[in-house]
Image: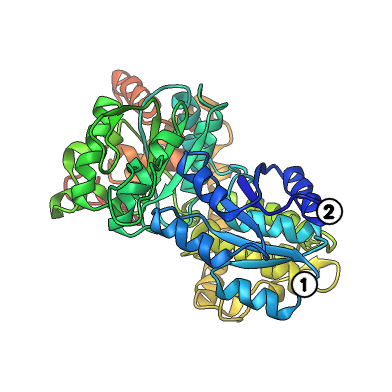
């Protein structure tokens, strides 16, 4: 988290800065708004501006926008009244922090802007397999494409890759391609020269140059305009960029990580994404499973969020009741980890008594989790679970007397039959790599065992055809 403080650094503002640094922020300081814009132009980037309300915030934001610089602003100040706070918000500040500061408020503002301190938590075998692959490729220079539904933790995975890379001591710069208008994204990425357009008062360093030596994350790259994709492709291929209005290529040394919640192969077929760019980005693909596909992560993540938001709100850490955990696991979580995090934040605030029960876990519309749209399905699943337990007991008794190797063979072949011969789906269910599965099947075939063949055009229950 890079914080640029604007204002006279004394008294309570200095105390706020120390609190921010204690929460991991890397702090820089200038006294005037024009100095802040100049520092941002030079590529000494920031994720957040903390500005004394006595600085002309409207002029600062206007100057930044004229230079196509996008950094959120929070205002702060001592002895500010309600009108001062309202004026700062009207001028464009996202929040107002009264001084003297409260440590919890500083922490909340920082965490709302940056995801730096989000650990990668995995307990489910399907997620652990992805993390294992990430560990294998983290220290390489390969471009990596991280795919998955919105909210599964793609940026968290990108930061994990950077932390495990040879570039971990260099910058990690993130650009949300969906949040910046097409006509501004080019300057944001590549920078511009003085006079390149109306309002370009000086050279501005873009995110490629900010990330030099480190990692550049292109978040939701599927939203990038096709014309800009061509310029990005050249930057990746030739390791040089052209600033807007520039005449001389600028060399850059970065590693690219991109994310997308869309099927980019489909976007290529539709003509909205360049096929050659997809090949350049997709040297290694990390697909993060949806939260409903990794039920083993739900309770672990829920416990983590309870501890996080109990500390942030100054309330005791309560355990999650057994009924609440069952409800959490049975919920579909269309919003994935992000939805679960918000639900547990609400639960921390609403819980009464020694535990967090089902009543405290509310959906966005205020309904308890058990009464949501999946409540009936959850009850049905509970019935299925009871019957499944009976079946499991019967199956367990059938295994008694077999060797581990025999049990393993039976499990692999039965799973493959269930998946109608689809090796990829069977490997995912078993929690092993496709290579391991193929080696096992070759071993069984050599023994004379018949191996279920893939059934063309037919998908296993609950899966798309592979």
The image shows residue 14 at horizontal and vertical percentages of 79, 49
* Between 157 and 53, the one nearer to me in the picture: 53
Name the secondary structure under disc 1.
Answer: loop
- Which residue: 56% across, 49% down? 36
The image shows residue 31 at horizontal and vertical percentages of 66, 50
Q: Is residue 65 above or below residue 92?
A: above
Q: What numbered label is drawn on residue 299? A: none
Name the secondary structure under disc 2.
Answer: helix
Q: Is residue 146 above or below residue 32?
A: above
* Between 306 and 184, the one nearer to me in the picture: 184
Q: Quadrant of the C terminus?
A: top left
Residue 368 figure quarter: bottom right
Q: Which residue is mark 1?
A: 351
Side (left or right) of 48 relative to 100: left
Q: Which residue is mark 2?
A: 11
- Which residue: 61% across, 81% down? 366
Q: Real-space Cα distance between discs 2 and 1?
A: 38 Å
Mark 1, Cα crowd under 10 Å, few <14 / some 14-19 / many 20+, is some
């Amino acid at each position: 988290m890079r914080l640029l403080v604007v204002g006279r650094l004394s008294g309570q503002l200095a105390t706020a800065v120390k609190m921010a640094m204690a929460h991991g922020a890397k702090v820089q300081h200038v006294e005037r708004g024009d100095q802040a814009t100049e520092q941002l132009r030079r590529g000494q980037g920031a994720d957040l501006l903390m500005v004394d309300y006595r600085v002309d915030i409207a002029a600062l934001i206007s100057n930044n926008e004229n230079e196509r610089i996008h950094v959120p602003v929070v205002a702060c100040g001592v002895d500010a009244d309600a009108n001062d706070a309202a004026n700062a918000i009207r001028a464009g500040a996202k929040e107002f922090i009264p001084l003297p500061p409260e440590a919890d408020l500083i922490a909340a503002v920082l965490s709302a802007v940056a995801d730096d301190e989000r650990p990668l938590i995995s307990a489910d075998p399907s997620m652990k397999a992805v993390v294992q692959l990430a560990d294998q490729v983290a220290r390489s220079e390969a471009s990596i494409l991280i795919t998955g539904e919105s909210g599964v933790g793609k940026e968290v995975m990108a930061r994990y890759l950077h932390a495990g890379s040879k570039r971990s001591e260099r910058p990690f710069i993130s650009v949300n391609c969906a949040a910046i208008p097409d006509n501004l994204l080019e300057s944001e990425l590549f920078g511009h020269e003085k006079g390149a357009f109306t309002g370009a008062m000086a050279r501005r360093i873009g995110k490629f140059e900010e990330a030099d030596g480190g990692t550049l994350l292109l978040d939701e790259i599927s939203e990038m305009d096709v014309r800009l994709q061509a310029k990005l492709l050249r930057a990746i291929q030739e390791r040089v960029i052209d600033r807007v209005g520039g005449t001389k290529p600028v060399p850059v040394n970065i590693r690219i990580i991109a994310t997308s919640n869309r099927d980019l192969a489909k976007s290529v077929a539709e003509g909205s994404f360049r096929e050659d760019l997809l090949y350049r980005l997709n040297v290694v693909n990390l697909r993060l499973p949806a939260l409903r596909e990794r039920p083993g992560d739900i309770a672990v993540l829920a416990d983590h969020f309870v501890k996080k938001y109990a500390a942030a709100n100054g309330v005791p850490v309560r355990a999650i009741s057994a009924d609440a955990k069952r409800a959490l696991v049975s919920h579909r979580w269309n919003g994935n980890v992000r939805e679960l995090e918000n639900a547990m934040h609400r639960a921390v605030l609403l819980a009464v008594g020694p535990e967090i029960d089902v009543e405290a876990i509310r959906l966005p519309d205020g309904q308890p989790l058990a009464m949501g749209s999946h409540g009936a399905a959850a009850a049905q699943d509970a019935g299925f679970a009871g019957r499944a337990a009976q079946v499991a007991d019967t199956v367990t008794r059938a295994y008694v007397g077999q060797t581990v190797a025999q049990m393993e063979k039976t499990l692999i072949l039965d799973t493959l039959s269930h998946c109608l011969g689809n090796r990829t789906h069977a490997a995912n269910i078993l929690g092993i790599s496709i290579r391991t599965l193929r080696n096992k099947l070759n071993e069984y075939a050599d023994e004379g065992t018949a191996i279920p063949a893939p059934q063309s055009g037919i998908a296993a229950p609950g899966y798309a055809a592979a």
